[in-house]
Amino acid sequence: MSEKVVLHYFNGRGKMESIRWLLTVAEVEFDEVHLTSRDQYEKLLADGALMFEQVPMVEIDGMRLVQTKAILKYIAEKYNLNGKDIKERAMINMYSEGLIDLMEMFMILVFTPPADLKTKLEGIETKATGRYLPVFEKALSGSIFLVGKQLSCADVQLMECSLMLEEKFPGILAQFPNVKSFQGRMSEKPAIRRFLQPGSKRKPQPDDVYVKTVMEVFNLKSPIIR
């Protein structure tokens, strides 16, 4: 097993993108092995590399970690991005899981039939502006970070999510000036500035090639839309 962190996933955002973001902010170099065929996936299964037969999978510190939240928490703990005490960690976890819920709505968009896309987007925008963004706007009132006085994984996920929102709904943050200011501060961090440049390991919005690859690797006849 490589000493360098290795990510096993598709060549696209999906559930691995938040892991890429967190490793980048922690300034941890990583390699990627992109799943492109069913044979690759079946070999990982045969090797016992996927505990629950799912990706993402991350090789780190001699382990093969699966389950996105477990991976994120491990990285956050290892690189001091998870608060200073149990109360801060509880708040960070709540913010983080809320952001994951919102970002997962975007992940399934690419698998949505065209006829349903407008309705799905309207639903996401309504939930983002009514349920999620007000929470972060309030948390950032008079604060640099979501929790405490230091950067956490929740901050990194909010940065990622805010950019995803603006990709689909330009101007959505106009109603949320604290979140927009937070985004500006985060973008000034050198690691994030580099990650946002063309040619970085940040993935673009998913396309038809990504969908086709996912379907073939998992041997799906039609995507499951939630």
Image (spheres, grey):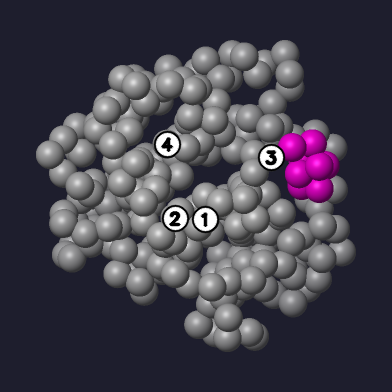
Magenta span includes 89: no
Q: Quadrant of the image for the N terminus?
A: bottom right
Instruction: Give the secondary structure at mark 1.
Output: helix
From the image, give the main secondary structure of the stretch colored magenta: helix
Q: Which three-letter amino acid code belongs to the residue tagged 2? A: Ile
Read off the residue under disc 1: 195
Read off the residue under disc 4: 162
Query: Residue 67: x, y in percent?
Result: 53, 59
Q: Which three-letter amino acid code belongs to the residue tagged 3? A: Pro
Q: Which three-letter amino acid code belongs to the residue tagged 1? A: Phe
Instruction: Give the secondary structure at mark 3.
Output: loop
Q: Distance from label 1 to label 2 (Cα)?
A: 5 Å
Give the magenta-colored segment's residue range.
Answer: 207-214
Work out whether mark 3 precedes mark 4 in sequence or the reverse, and give the earlier one: 4
Read off the residue under disc 2: 192
The label on residue 206 is: 3
> Is 182 above or below relative to 56?
above
> Is 127 above or below relative to 39?
above
Work out whether mark 2 precedes mark 3 in sequence or the reverse, and give the earlier one: 2
Q: Nearer the viewer, mark 4 or mark 2?
A: 2
- The answer to whether any part of residue 51 appears in the image is no
Q: Distance from label 2 to label 3 (Cα)?
A: 21 Å
Is 65 positioned to the left or the right of 43 in the image?
A: left
Work out whether mark 3 precedes mark 1 in sequence or the reverse, and give the earlier one: 1
